[in-house]
Image (cartoon, rainbow, N blue to C red):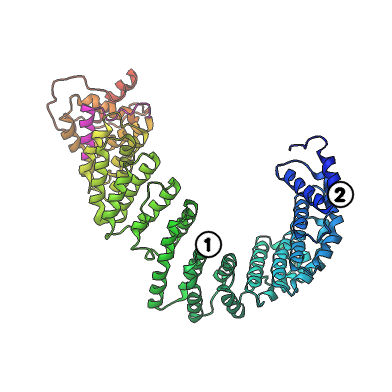
Amino acid sequence: MNVPKKGENYELRADLNSEYRDKRKDAIKRVIANMTVGKDVSGLFPDVLKNMQTEDIEQKKLVYLYLMNYAKTQPELVILAVNTFVKDADDPNPLIRALAIRTMGVLRAEKIIDYLCDPLQKCLRDENPYVRKTAAICVAKLYDLKPELAIDNGFIEQLQELISDANPMVVANAVLALTDIHNAAAAQPSSSTTDKPIFPLNSQILSKLLVALNECTEWGRVAILTALARYTATDEQESEHICERVVPQFQHVNGSVVLAAVKVIMIHMRNVKREDLTKQLIRKMAPPLVTLLSSPPEVQWVALRNINLLLQKRSDVLQNEMRVFFCKYNDPLYVKVEKLDIMIRLAGEQNVDALLSELKEYASEVDVDFVRRSTRAIGQCAIKIESAADRCVNVLLELIATKVTYVVQEAVVVMKDIFRKYPSTYEGVIPTLYTFIGQGKYGADAVQKASANSLSSLDDEATSKQRALQNIVNAQNAENLLDFGDDDSQESQLSGLAATTISTTPAATINALQNSANPLDDLVSIFGSSGLGASTSPPPQRPAMGGLGGLSFSPQPASPATPVMSPPPNQAAQAQDDLLGLF
């Protein structure tokens, strides 16, 4: 903390004790200015305190501001201000009365709490509504400091009485204070010393809240709407009545009021059985939600998060509003991500073409993270909408053809999920994927894992196994597909698949290996990386068969095959012996 210049406190102290009122007020302003920039002026506490007793409201506010800042560090001196607070609570000016009770609640000093009760009792019954609404908030602060004191002095009951107040702002502040106390008591049941409900909601209170709803400020409306969301309607007619009274809040300019009103409608719409009323409410709900998307990015993000939750419950609310969620060039990434999620939820047969066109454009942007998410969204469309799967796969193939590394990687990962969703449907795409995977420049971890998982997902049908084996053999002769560098787990996964295929479909194995340049070395490479050659237990004894499985084939002239992984000499020899014994 910065220390004032030497002698500055002496000068301020002299001015604070000056006989001229203007000079004292100017000194208080300088003290507050020093306090604002972080200078320690706590040593002037007694001198500032002397200037509390004044009729100048501006000067009194400055002194109260100083007290609120140093009340925690100087709790023993705050007690000196109690008499002035009590006197100000009886001042003829309602602004001073409200200022005094507000400051006493903010000080949060235990030594002053006991002196707060009597002025607070008077202010809760004050004739001026501004003082009453300020005192209502002060009760919540008192409960936070000392719950038993607030309950024993009957402040909770007085707050409940204020709900019937004629002034809507007093009602709103009473609801806000009771809601805060109710939440605090629910979070810490041991701190509450009463068995009575702190904020009971019944039909009488409901009618009072609905009357005050349209007459209070925006934050008062949020407090009342939050309370209405907690209310449990007794029958369908009451739910319809609540919805009809809350619907006008959709037109409010404040986004918090709109979202709070949507929450109330969604909760009470569960009890509405009339189809026409439900459709009417949903139709009225869409325009205000769309309007929120023209707000600043921070407000947009909050609105989008709420819209996402809303669509999980009622996807038909915005079913015709897909285009408003299209990303703009200047949207921050966190807004674009939320819009992508919402577009996937709204995707259907009627709008999938426009969505795919938009996602394809997103996949050509410069933001790598956003491009990956957009590519992933195309795969989600294919999984969600079966009739559009062909179009989605074609778009993915077009993206793969761009040869952008991270686009190819994400597209292969997406194709893995599509293979699992639609087995034996898009096997013709696999050679195209292998073409890009085998080129080396796309051999990142994501592509390697996706290719291994894609082959594994085809392991359920014999034809898929044969195709996988044939592709492995072809790729091994051409590009050495199984050479994944140092990633043993991925190499073992593909090799294990090949070994399983060989043992379960020997006929397909023979047909595939007839095209191999060196079948025995290829099999040794496959089985050796799968761990067969390293097995310590001898292979099971099988009757000798001519050739592979009793069938003969004429291998081509021996030529050195490209090994998948060079095993140690003893491991390769053991693998060859195992294979000869097996076949």
- How packed mark 1 is, by other alpha carbons closer than 10 Å (few <14, some 14-19, many 20 or more), is some
Q: Quadrant of the N terminus?
A: top right
**Does residue 236 sit above or below 302 in this rendering?**
below
Horizontal and vertical percent position of residue 452: 32, 37
- How packed mark 2 is, by other alpha carbons closer than 10 Å (few <14, some 14-19, many 20 or more), is some
Label 1 element class: helix
The residue singled out by tag 2 in the image is 18
Q: Nearer the viewer, residue 202 or 289?
A: 289
Q: Which residues are magenta?
A: 466-487
The residue singled out by tag 1 in the image is 256
Q: Is residue 263 left or right of residue 463?
A: right
Label 2 element class: loop
Q: Examine the rendering and report whether any part of residue 421 can be seen.
A: no
Residue drawn 38% across and 43% down?
A: 370
In the current view of this chain or complex, which residue is farthest to the left?
A: 554
Horizontal and vertical percent position of residue 366: 36, 39
Q: CA distance from mark 1 to mark 2?
A: 49 Å
On whether residue 163 falls in the magenta region, the answer is no
Q: Nearer the viewer, residue 228 or 525?
A: 228
Horizontal and vertical percent position of residue 425: 22, 49
On whether residue 478 falls in the magenta region, the answer is yes
Q: How many marks?
A: 2
Q: Nearer the viewer, residue 292 or 389?
A: 292
Q: Is residue 470 left or right of residue 283?
A: left
Horizontal and vertical percent position of residue 230: 57, 69
Residue drawn 47% across and 51% down?
A: 297
Query: In front of the other: label 1 or label 2?
Result: 2
